[in-house]
Image (cartoon, rainbow, N blue to C red):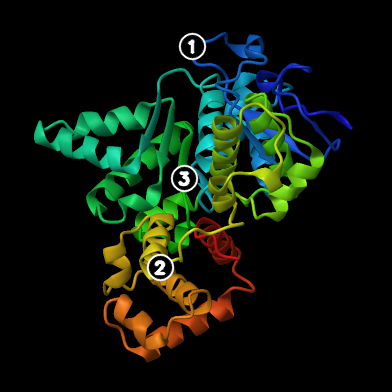
Amino acid sequence: MTPFTLVTESTTSPAGSPMSVSVSNGTLFSIARPLPNGPTGQDRSSALVGGDQFVGDAANHLVRWVWDRITDRCCSKQVLVDRCRSLWPLVLSGPSGVGKSLVADCVSAQLQTLFSGDVISTSADDLVRGFLAAGDVNAVEDWVSRHENAAVLVIDPIARLADFPTVQLLLCEIIDQRNQVGLPTVFVTVEAIGHCRLLDRLASRLAQGLTCPLATPGQEAMSALVRLAFARLDIPISEEQILWLWKSGLRSVPTLQQVASRWLLECGRVPFVGALAPESIKLLLGCSRLTPVTPEAVLRLTAKFFQLSVKDLRGASRAMNCSRARALAMWICRQHLKISYQRIGELFGNRDHSTVLSSCKKIEASLPTDAFLQNALQQLLYRLALQ
């Protein structure tokens, strides 16, 4: 066993610090954000923001490859800039809770050391609001110029632009200009670009760069994250209890943080023992359920996961993202809540029972080979506390 070390000097954590953990040598990697407004270059060693780290394993090897590519200390700054041109735009995709936004933050903070200027990190909703505000004062050209010339541009999540074609077209111009001068652009999305309701013109530009899918943390990566979360709060936890958390279905980093925080609030800094965990923690882990799961809960959580509304799932939209979410919610209602096809059809906008049956069969056929669908189902069952 060796101390857990990070990929680059700019993100190392001193051995012996509360953030140090032990894992098998060579199996895991981690990246973290440097402190804002802190020292630059190699002096940024061990500077972390609140201890936030992305921990990856073999399932996320492409994340490590990207990180190593933009932090190669053997290359000069200009060589790095030229070599990274093929990455832009970089698209980080994957289910909720796997760390896409954290990776985007880490990447943008690191890239700021290569490209002089400001970083624009914005949600898609704020991007639209900024465009509308610029239109009100006849300043759209300035809005476009500001995004074209930012040192780093990060947009999270890109799928929320589906209903704003004008913004998408302007974003195409922004991407073209940034690619021409080699400036980095990073997008975050739950689904693959081909499954988002984007204009073909924008989708083709996003496909010109690198799409980096993120997978749900495996057992080794999640075990390391458990150690980090509990060490941050000074709560002792044994390897046996870490295994108990994994077997209980712990697959989400936000849920892990909630488990650690609730244990501290309800039990204090005593060693974690899963068998003695309060009901609220067991409910988080899916070990217990205080109230039956309702179809409305399935609708609500599925809509949230796919960044849609319940109205979308009950409506007539046939967009791929919406239809897959609707079909998956129907399948969960049928398989786990044991609701009749006719009743499911009524819940989903008064659809015919044959439509529900067809949707459920499509999910059954796709699950064995569709990794995104598998992750989505795993996350939804976990949040609904269903086995």
Q: Are the two marked residues, 1 and 3, in contact with CB atoms closer than 8 angstroms?
A: no
Spatial separation of the CA atoms under disc 1 and disc 3: 25 Å
Q: Are marks 1 and 2 in contact (CB under 8 Å)?
A: no
- The residues tagged by marks 3 and 2 sit, at their Cα atoms, a distance apart of 31 Å
Label 2 neighbour load within 10 Å: few <14, some 14-19, many 20+:
few
User: Which of 285 and 56 lies nearest the eye of the viewer?
Assistant: 285
Q: State whether residue 201 is above or below residue 105.
A: below
Q: Which of 25 and 135 lies nearest the eye of the viewer?
A: 25
In the rendered image, which quarter is residue 317 located in? bottom left
Residue nearest the observer in this picture, 186 or 322: 322
Tag in front: 3 or 2: 2
Q: Disc 1 designates what residue?
A: 37
Residue 249 seen: yes
In-image side of 55 versus 38 (left or right): right
> Disc 1 on helix, strand or loop?
loop
Across and down, in percent, residue 200 comes to 37, 60
Residue 209 in view (yes/no): no
Percent x, y of residue 87: 56, 41
Secondary structure beneath dot 2 equals: loop
Instruction: Name the image quarter holding the N terminus.
Output: top right
Sequence-first tag of 1 and 2: 1
Residue type marked 2 = Thr
Residue at 58% x, 11% y: name it.
40
Position of residue 36 measured from the top left corner of the image (x, y, whole percent): 50, 16
For label 1, count other residues whose C-alpha is less than 10 Å away and answer few (under 14), some (14-19) or many (20+): few
Task: Name the quadrant containing residue 103.
Answer: top right
| Residue 130's disc number | none
Q: Residues within 10 Å of mark 3 (few under 14, many from 20)?
A: many
Which residue is labeled 2 in the image? 294
Please state if 346 lies on the left or on the right of 13 as rendered: left
